[in-house]
Amino acid sequence: MKSNPDHNCLFEIAKDQAGYFSSSQAGTCGFSWERLSNTVKNGKFRRVSPGIYRFQQYPESRFEDLFIALLKTGSHSVLSHVTALSVYGLSDALPGVIHVTIPRNASRRRQGIKFHTKSILQNEITLYEGLRVTTVERTIIDLFESGFDPGLLRQAVDQSLERGLTTKALLVNAIGNRKKNSFINLEKIISRGLA
């Protein structure tokens, strides 16, 4: 931990998070609670939630609630399931809560957040508008496995193909070594995509 506040250090962290950062991230750059409070008072930072801040020079994101959820759930958390669909703008599904996938050993106590504890490979995570989110392919597989509405799933597949967010080959490849019998219906949805 740095002894003096380092604005450049904190800016480097926040720039990849649309200007948002947590108090613990600020602490690694030498910001005490008192210093954070004073920086909020002088207008350089804006407190958006307990323990979550944003550089004032960054505009408020339309995904502010999602940045807050990721910062509160830790550096290994990733937006997933119907929340990932919402980030990509796929299908008419509207999440009632924020879906986050976290490592099995992480804390699962956050109001308004639905936790999933599946393993996610690094190549199944991407940055989309600064948010850590499961790839389109992983999102579709997660939703299929969770029993998501088949009509909305078909809509998500069609829209993702139409917008070039994925391809049929990538979707089929993502199924890969999973139990083939249980994914036959998903493969049918993919093969009919944009038909």
Image (cartoon, grey):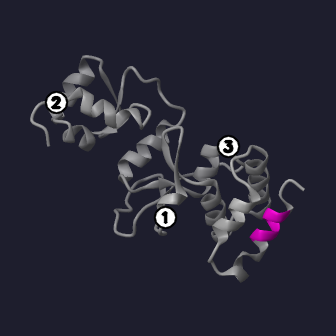
On residue 194, which mark appears?
Answer: none
Identify the residue under disc 1: 121
- Bin the neighbour count of mark 3 within 10 Å (Cα to Cα): few under 14, some 14-19, many 20 and up: some
Q: Is 171 above or below relative to 41?
A: below
Quick check: 113 left or right of 168? left
Q: Image point 47% across, 69% down: which residue?
A: 119
Q: Nearer the viewer, residue 110 or 27?
A: 27
Quick check: 60 left or right of 36? right
Please identify the quadrant where the N terminus is shown.
top left
Q: Image point 58% across, 51% down: which residue?
A: 83
At mark 1, the secondary structure is loop
- Per the image, is 189 magenta? yes
- Per the image, is 59 magenta? no
Percent position of residue 149, x then y: 74, 63
On residue 5, which mark appears?
Answer: 2
Secondary structure, magenta segment, majority class: helix
Q: Earlier in the sequence, mark 2 or mark 1?
A: 2
- Examine the image and state in which quarter residue 17 appears: top left
At mark 3, the secondary structure is loop
On residue 89, which mark appears?
Answer: 3
Magenta residue span: 186-191
